[in-house]
């Protein structure tokens, strides 16, 4: 079936009714979303645009694509959520090229930290990487190499994970990893109740069922985040 519209990039998806979704957003979650969206208008990520221009993927990407593009990309929303939540510890699952970690790190409260997890070190050969050694010097950004979808690795980092106030999951979207990670998270009692969890790419085909099955209060923030889907959850 041909696409009904032309776009530089497209992914198949489905739209579902919301009124029969078991999980509905709470008043607190709606208030947080509105505040984060307001703050997202005010934040600046010019330095990420510069790093992207210098080290980002090759030119097959759309020439207007940049981290500060908002709405469309989620980096300013991540910054806005960081300002709204004021977390002491953020856990990111999926370091990737480092853009999300830096967007969050810039707007952390003084003394707060972001722990980013991946199975590949940030120095390893990637299609692109914006991180530099100086980003880790002040101790507010730390990377750990572990597959948190496995129960063994998750158990190893429970003392760190349970201290998180905000979690951002940007995994492979293979229909398996994210579900296993969320299942592991259900076994953990977080110190912060409720925890704010941000789930990327919830409109992609492999993520549709995972997002629908979330039973905690949740809200689709795609119009203020990533074009491929951004959801926030009051976890626990």
Image: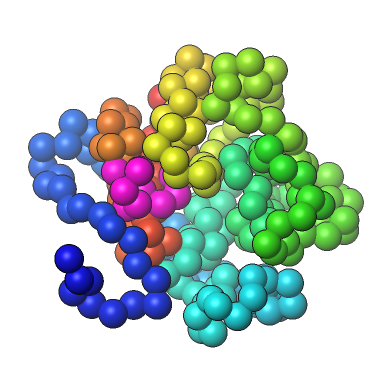
Q: Quadrant of the C terminus?
A: top left
Residue 3, image x, y percentages: 22, 71
What is the tally of numbered marks visible in this picture? 0
Between 46 and 170, the one lying in front of the other is 170
Kindly indicate the quadrant of the structure image that contains residue 63.
bottom right
Q: Is there any visible trace of residue 29 in the rendered image?
A: no
What residue do we see at 83% from left, 45% from top? Answer: 139
Between 111 and 64, the one lying in front of the other is 64
Residue 42, image x, y percentages: 52, 72
Q: Is residue 228 above or below residue 2?
A: above
Q: Quadrant of the N terminus?
A: bottom left
Kindly indicate the quadrant of the structure image that contains residue 232.
top left
Residue that lies at the very extreme toward the bottom in this rendered image: 63
Q: Is residue 205 magenta?
A: yes
Q: Is residue 236 above or below residue 129?
A: above
Residue that lies at the very extreme toward the front in this rendered image: 1
Numbered range of the magenta stretch: 199-208
Between 5 and 19, the one lying in front of the other is 5
Residue 101, image x, y percentages: 66, 53
């Amino acid at each position: 079936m041909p696409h009904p519209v032309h776009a530089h990039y497209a992914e198949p998806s489905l739209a579902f009714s919301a009124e029969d979704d078991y999980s509905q957003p709470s008043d607190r979650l709606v208030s947080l979303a509105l505040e984060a969206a307001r703050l997202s208008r005010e934040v600046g990520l010019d330095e990420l645009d510069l790093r992207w221009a210098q080290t980002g993927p090759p030119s097959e990407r759309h020439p207007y694509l940049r981290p500060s593009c908002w709405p469309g990309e989620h980096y300013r929303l991540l910054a806005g959520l960081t300002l709204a939540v004021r977390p002491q510890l953020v856990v990111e699952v999926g370091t990737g090229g480092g853009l999300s970690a830096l967007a969050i790190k810039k707007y952390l409260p003084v003394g707060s930290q972001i722990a980013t997890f991946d199975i590949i070190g940030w120095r390893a050969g990637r299609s692109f990487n914006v991180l530099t050694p100086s980003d880790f010097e002040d101790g507010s950004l730390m990377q750990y190499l572990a597959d948190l979808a496995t129960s063994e690795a998750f158990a190893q980092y429970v003392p760190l994970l349970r201290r998180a106030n905000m979690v951002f999951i940007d995994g492979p979207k293979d229909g398996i990893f994210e579900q296993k990670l969320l299942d592991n998270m259900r076994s953990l009692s977080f110190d912060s109740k409720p925890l704010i969890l941000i789930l990327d790419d919830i409109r992609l085909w492999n993520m549709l069922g995972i997002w629908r099955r979330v039973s905690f209060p949740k809200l689709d923030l795609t119009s203020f985040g990533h074009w491929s889907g951004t959801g926030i959850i009051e976890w626990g």
